[in-house]
């Protein structure tokens, strides 16, 4: 059984950032992916994430790191969220700064705390299996490891990073914990097929669990200036000086993903552990994945999202997202993606869904910020 004292010291952290640019024009700067219902559950991805974590840590031990512009929307979605547990970023600074700041604040408030970082915009089914994996991860973290939860690949995906598993770690209370041989960034298709056939690779789902002091120690080793800034912020966070210190320190923090600042160097030291997750997981990274969620993987189906959507389809498949009430007619098109909003229309195919981000980049360059 997991160590109850370790679980008692567990704190959930939800980084709620990014705009989900591959889901434009549905996901926008003022209404990012995590504030949408993309699963048909009747509530947003953020709310789903909260409901999944509350049984593990309790709703008074969940911290949300989000942008200042999203505070009102986040608090409306999460009325149980305690005010001291709202951490606002003045501008996006990537995952090391977001998760590292949460760790530094919580370590100052509660030395010995174990934190788990879970994205606000992922879809996870089989909550009991998710809870089991997190409990094992907490025990492994208490033993001094930086821990991630990997997902068994269902296909040779090129949109995810991969975790190469090594030997069993034989940790009491974490029977499935494995050492991580290496962290591998998003591969090409041939490499992804090789990983799938190998059987020793898991998808990187971006979940990290660690004692806050250990996480900060590893950030200090790889990014000392960033670490110093995080400690300066944490020292001022619960004082009247917070605003002035944030305005001074936050803009100069380095932008770097935690995969690069912590996971890769820690894996090289042999101190990164992985718990294989046996639950269904999707990062809902593009419209193709949303279509798959709603069709159960059946390519001939047409998924339709949007209250009051008016769609007439004949011999067509893919996904339609309608927020206008306009009639949309599809005839003889396969794997189509149509996203209709009042000020922007996207038409593409499932095969090209990952390329939507390039449209957002082009709109930024063209100065068309009114539709971003």
Image (cartoon, helix red, strand yellow):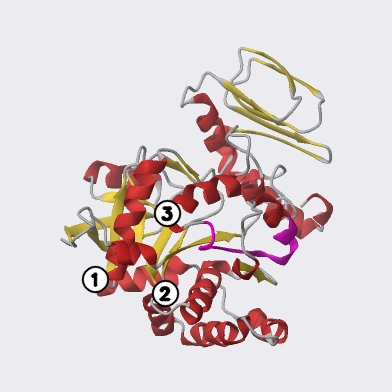
Please state if 208 lies on the left or on the right of 321 as rendered: left
- Label 3: element kind: helix
Of the residues under marks 3 and 1, which one precedes in the sequence? 3
Which label number is shown at residue 270?
1
Between disc 3 and disc 1, the foreground one is 3
Residue hosting label 3? 56
Residue 39 drawn at (x, y percent)? 57, 35
Crowd rating for badge 2 (residues with CA inside 10 Å; few <14, some 14–19, many 20+) = many
Q: Distance between the residues labelled 3 and 1?
A: 28 Å
Q: Residue at x 57, y 42 (%)?
A: 286
Mark 1 or 2 closer to N-term? 2
Is disc 2 placed on a helix, strand or loop? helix
From the top left corner, tell me how far across and down residue 232 is, in percent. 57, 88
Which one is nearer the viewer's eye here, 249 or 141?
141
> Bounds of the magenta span?
59-72
Say if residue 202 shows up in the picture.
no
> Mark 1, mark 2: which one is toward the viewer?
2
Check if mark 3's residue and mark 1's residue have beta carbons within 8 Å.
Answer: no
Q: What residue would you read off at disc 2?
A: 212
- Residue 113 image offset from top left, x and y in percent: 41, 73
Using the image as rendered, state which of residue 165 and residue 237 is in the foreground: 237
Tell me the distance, in whole angstroms, between the alpha carbons under discs 1 and 2: 19 Å
């Amino acid at each position: 059984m997991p160590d109850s004292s370790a679980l008692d010291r567990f704190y959930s952290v939800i980084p709620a950032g990014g705009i989900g640019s591959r889901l434009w024009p549905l996901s926008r700067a003022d209404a990012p992916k995590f504030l949408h219902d993309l699963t048909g559950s009747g509530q947003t991805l953020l709310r789903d994430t909260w409901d999944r974590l509350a049984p593990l840590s309790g709703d008074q031990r969940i911290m949300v790191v989000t942008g200042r512009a999203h505070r009102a929307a986040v608090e409306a979605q999460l009325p149980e969220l305690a005010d001291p547990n709202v951490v606002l970023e003045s501008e996006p600074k990537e995952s090391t700064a977001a998760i590292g700041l949460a760790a530094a604040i919580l370590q100052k408030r509660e030395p010995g705390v174990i934190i788990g970082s879970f994205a606000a915009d992922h879809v996870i089914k089989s909550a009991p299996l998710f809870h089991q994996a997190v409990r094992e991860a907490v025990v492994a973290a208490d033993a001094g490891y930086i821990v991630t939860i990997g997902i068994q690949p269902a296909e040779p995906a090129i949109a995810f990073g991969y975790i190469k598993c090594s030997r069993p770690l034989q940790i009491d209370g974490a029977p499935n914990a494995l050492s991580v041989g290496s962290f591998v960034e998003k591969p090409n298709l041939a490499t992804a097929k090789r990983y799938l056939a190998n059987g020793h690779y898991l998808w990187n789902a971006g979940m990290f669990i660690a004692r806050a002091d250990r996480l900060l120690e590893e950030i200090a080793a790889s990014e000392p200036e960033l670490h110093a800034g995080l400690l300066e912020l944490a020292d001022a966070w619960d004082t009247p000086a917070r605003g002035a210190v944030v305005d001074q320190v936050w803009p100069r923090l380095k932008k770097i993903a935690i995969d690069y600042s912590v996971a890769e160097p820690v894996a090289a030291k042999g101190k990164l552990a992985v718990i294989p997750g046996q639950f269904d997981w999707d990062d809902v990274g593009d419209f193709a994945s949303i279509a798959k969620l709603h069709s159960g993987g059946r390519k001939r189906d047409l998924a339709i999202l949007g209250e009051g959507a008016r769609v007439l389809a004949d011999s067509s498949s893919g996904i339609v997202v309608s927020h206008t009430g306009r009639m949309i007619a599809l005839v003889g098109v396969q794997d189509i993606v149509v996203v209709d909003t009042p000020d922007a229309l996207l038409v593409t195919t499932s095969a090209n869904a990952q390329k939507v981000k390039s449209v957002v980049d082009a709109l930024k360059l063209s100065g068309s910020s009114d539709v971003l």
